[in-house]
Amino acid sequence: MSETRVERDVVQLSAKHLSRDFTSRVPGRFVSARQVTHAVDDVSLDLVAGRVVAVVGESGSGKSVLARMLARIVRPTSGALALRGTPIPARAKRDLAYASMVQLVLQDPFASVNPVHRIRHSLERPLLIHGAERTQVGELASAVLKRVSLDSSDRFLDRYPHELSGGQLQRVSIARALCVKPKVLLADEPISMLDVSVRLGILNLLKGLCDDENLAVLYITHDIASARYLADETIVMYAGQVVEQSHGTALVDAPTHPYTQLLIASVPDPSDPTAVSARDASLRIPASASAGCRFAPRCPDAMARCASESPPAFEVRPGHFSRCWLNENDRVATLVAPLTRRKGEPTTT
Amino acid sequence: MSATIPREVQSTAAEGGRASTGPVRDGAIRESVLEINHFSVDYGAGENMVRAVSDVTLRLERSRVLGIAGESGSGKSTLVYAMTRLLRSPGLISGGEVILHVTDEGGAVTPVNLVTATESELRRVRWSHVSIVLQSALSALNPVLRIGREFDEVLKTHRPNLTKAQRRARAEELLRMVGLSGDRLERFPHELSGGQRQRVMIAVALALDPELVVMDEPTTALDVVTQREIIGELSTLRAQFGFAMIFITHDLSLLVELADEIAVMYAGSIVERAGARELYESPRHPYTLGLLNSFPPLHGERRELTGIPGTPPDLADPPTGCSFAPRCAFAMERCVLEKPTLVEVDDTGRSVACWLFDDASGSRVPVELSRVAPRAEAPKGGS
């Protein structure tokens, strides 16, 4: 088992300064103008074997574009990817070898499994494409169903997607990704379309794959509570940027960025009826390139400086980064200050 | 602006503001807006018949919020589609009645049984008195029509004496109520974000100031921050206009915050009905307990949660006894043989369909299901 141990800390996929811009035309009265949206702006992360990295953010924060860049379905505008230490040439096309290492699981299982083919087809096709013997694919397909705790009988393989529940279909979708024995699994909101009582089953499945088979997992979600449940490292994205990043449950337990605090306050939490109701988030502006902090127009703690200068990522404590001017001075004090003030307690200095 | 707010708003608005904070107990004296009695819905007939909703009895009082929680396939959407007579073949109402208490312009209240109502009666009631907001706003809004047309059609049909300019003014006012600017009327659905589209749906639903608004998972497709904003707007609108609401979702923790009363559905039947707080503080049905434990917490130690093992039953071949028995940790012999009925288990108006609470089964209620709600006066004796 020493091999597994070595495997555990290996950085499987590493992204450095990934950015992606989308250009669109805005029709004007006489001429149309070009508008550039920075969907993902300078994001770096490492996906390590046996660890789950969660990316949390709202719709439009760039989290899905990030996942698609990591799967090389979307080409980055700038930045570099390295798979197990080997740099990926920027202009190279995505090939089979890359696809067999990095697999993507999508949000809506009903839309991502072909409805006119049996489950068998969906599982055997990737196996055949990746060079498995035709005589063996049946066996391999039922083996992979077992790994996701599904009925691996022929009867199940011969079913059509409409005969399965959402939870079962998402497991099929994960099984399909596992067919090619990937090292990295990118899961883009895998539970948001599923029923509440089966969501934990899928999260536990991902955790199990990560722990037992040393998969590196990227878990994309807008549900910060599920990120806290699952992740070894959590990244919060806003308007394409990483605004806060930390290990374990630290990010949810002691958030230092006002946006993270807003996200946490938005989660329905009946255990705390006296909880501060969601802070005013009604202001919305498009994520265009402005000089200051992108969250400033919605931020309840915004200062004059926030509108003019973009904050860098401050390390508020080892391994915990926050892109907010509030964390600039006296790191430890400011880490506590915004939180205590919100709960109505006196600020300690 | 008050000139454009029609009819009985003034009288119900004040009451609505108070109603949302009041406890459930004074319920008996409150006027009901909707009564569902022994309502059943089938899909298909004969051998292939599937009973999607079986023997549901519910009552909703004016200006209050009833939450219906359940998973996909639990029959919650079928219930509201059938109740509003929107259900299409092969869906078939096989029994029961749905009484909507319609308040007309003079303030007189007439009961209308929606199950037996004719098309023309339905046309009179729909949208003016009961409206519906569907889960997928993108498929509910016509993709080739501008947003303004959605409002225009509703107002043209039900308020034929309004002029074009008045209709436009009303539409702009409705959009403002849900936090959108009037120029959105010129947009097409695809130009709006998911949250904006859902706001448009809510605004259209409120166009004729109905007494009852049915919301079928309106925030499920949205992210948490947008969901929080829309829930906040709904409370403001309810305080202002005092409409009653049926809110369907699978997110039980959201319902605990939003609803006055919650009905939990499983496999077509209501398994527990209780005040929102009571349900959260002291769930009685094992399925409710399981659902409440399916949400990873935001606080405390990180520990492994299991959710509910197994999958919901196939309604084409339902189990003989309690439909939850195969997944239930507390199942007894009786549970697989006999189907429990919904009975009141304490004097807070709470009803549970579970044999654990039947005195004749002689079983002891497990400790997880006998917690006492802080505000409940007298829970079931012996627990």
Image: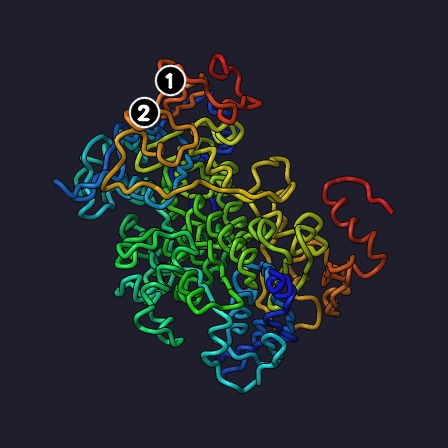
Q: Position of residue A164 (x, y in %)?
A: 31, 53
Q: Is residue B183 visible?
A: yes
Q: Position of residue B171 (x, y in %)?
A: 41, 55
Q: Chain of mark 1?
A: B
Q: Residue pushed farthest left?
A: B46
Between marks 1 and 2, how big is the CA–CA gap?
Answer: 9 Å
Q: Amino acid at mark 1?
A: Asp
Quarter holding the N terminus of chain A? bottom right
Of residues B66 and A48, the one nearer the viewer is A48
Q: Secondary structure at mark 2?
A: loop
Q: Chain of mark 2?
A: B
Q: Position of residue B96 (x, y in %)?
A: 22, 30
Q: Which residue is mark 2?
A: B340
Considering only vertical position in the picture, is B71 above or below B154?
Answer: above
Q: Is residue B377 left or right of residue B48?
A: right
The answer to whether the residue labelled 1 contacts the one labelled 2, judged by CB atoms less than 8 Å apart, is yes
Q: Position of residue A54 (x, y in %)?
A: 59, 59
Q: Amino acid at mark 2?
A: Pro
Q: Is residue B98 left or right of residue B382?
A: left
The lab-note entry on whether marks 1 and 2 share a chain reads yes
How packed is label 1: few (under 14 Cα within 10 Å), some, or many (20 or more)? Answer: some
At 30% from the left edge and 63% from the top edge, which residue is drawn? A120
Of residues A51 and A299, the one nearer the viewer is A51
Q: Residue pushed farthest bottom?
A: A91
Q: Quadrant of residue A316?
A: bottom right
Q: Secondary structure at mark 1?
A: loop
At 57% from the left edge and 67% from the top edge, which residue is drawn? A286
Q: Is residue B165 left or right of residue B14?
A: left
**Marked residue nearer the N-terminal end (1 or 2):** 2
Of residues A141 and A64, the one nearer the viewer is A141
Q: Which residue is mark 1?
A: B358
